[in-house]
Amino acid sequence: MPVSGIPEYPVTLEHSPPADLDKYIPNPGMPRANKAVSREKPDGDPRSPTNRTVLQQHVMFWDRDSDGVIWPIDTFVGFRRLGFNMLISALAVPFIHFSFSYPTLKSWIPDPRLPIYLDRIHRTKHGSDSEVYDNEGRFVPEKFEELFSKYDRDNKGGLGWRDIQELVYSHMNINDPVGWYGNPTWAEGGKWERGGLLLRDHKGLVSKEKIRGVYDGTIWETVAREVEERKKRNASPYKQD
């Protein structure tokens, strides 16, 4: 039987890989091009488009007119739709577009408009990440399940704030400032921290399904609808208690 941890190196016992995944997910180590699958959802989400990679699905919410390009104004509007205030939404624009526009361009000449092209979004993959996306933007189920076997210590069905902090610090690669904090809204540390604040429940827990929905982007429209409904309720003269 394979040994995944040894007492002489305690960290291997503290962070255990998932076991028996093949009972729920066929070939869990094989990357899925267009489905973010999990133990609970072995077929992924039916809303996910089959002609886009999971990494493309992750950011399609910000492509408002579905032209395959995310412009700075798209990013600002997208963050506002998710309920972020004007300041955070405005700060997100330069951080994201200065970091990720250039790798997606066809030419080596920078585009001052800072577009992000979805057909080359896989080039924006950074270090110090969870490796749930592979280098081509596919989704690796085994790596996704590792997030919970390693960091959901109490089998809560999700990750709390301390779990997320430990996850981020455990994945920090040496000499990788971009992956650490270079982009406080999209790179690994900021992505998890912002997501935790946005998606946590009243107990401070971010459920496994919500995290899966972050990877394939299905959670964004859900959150945007909730924000819009909340605004309508607050604006209504007949507010419900």
Image (spheres, rainbow, N blue to C red):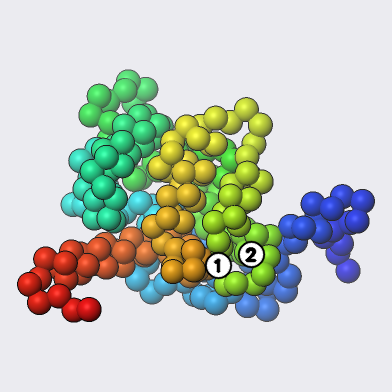
In the image, residue 2 lies at what x, y percent?
86, 64
Q: Are marks 1 and 2 in contact (CB under 8 Å)?
A: yes
Indicate whether 144 appears above or below 130. Answer: below
* Residue 10 visible somewhere in the drawing: yes
Residue pushed farthest left? Answer: 237
Which quarter of the figure has residue 237?
Answer: bottom left
Indicate whether 43 appears above or below 93. Answer: below
In the image, residue 115 lies at what x, y percent?
27, 35
* Residue 54 visible somewhere in the drawing: no
Which quarter of the figure has residue 216?
Answer: bottom left
Q: Amino acid at mark 2?
A: Asp
Indicate whether 195 appears above or below 91. Answer: below
In the image, residue 218 lies at what x, y percent?
36, 65
Q: CA–CA distance between discs 1 and 2?
A: 6 Å
Query: Residue at image x 28%, y 31%?
Result: 114
Q: Which mark is on residue 152?
A: 2
Residue density around tag 2, few if under 14, some if 14–19, many if 20 or more, within 10 Å = many
Residue under numbered circle 1 = 158
- State which tag comes first along the sequence, 1 or 2: 2
Residue pushed farthest right? Answer: 8
For the C terminus, give its image quadrant.
bottom left
As helix, strand or loop, the secondary structure at mark 2 comes to: loop
As helix, strand or loop, the secondary structure at mark 1 comes to: strand
38 with respect to 118 (left or right): right
Query: Residue at image x 37%, y 22%?
Result: 108
* Depth order, front residue of 68/61: 61
Indicate whether 174 appears above or below 76. Answer: above
Query: Residue at image x 10%, y 71%?
Result: 236
In the image, residue 192 lies at what x, y percent?
49, 51
38 with respect to 142 (left or right): left
35 with respect to 231 (left or right): right
Q: Amino acid at mark 1?
A: Gly
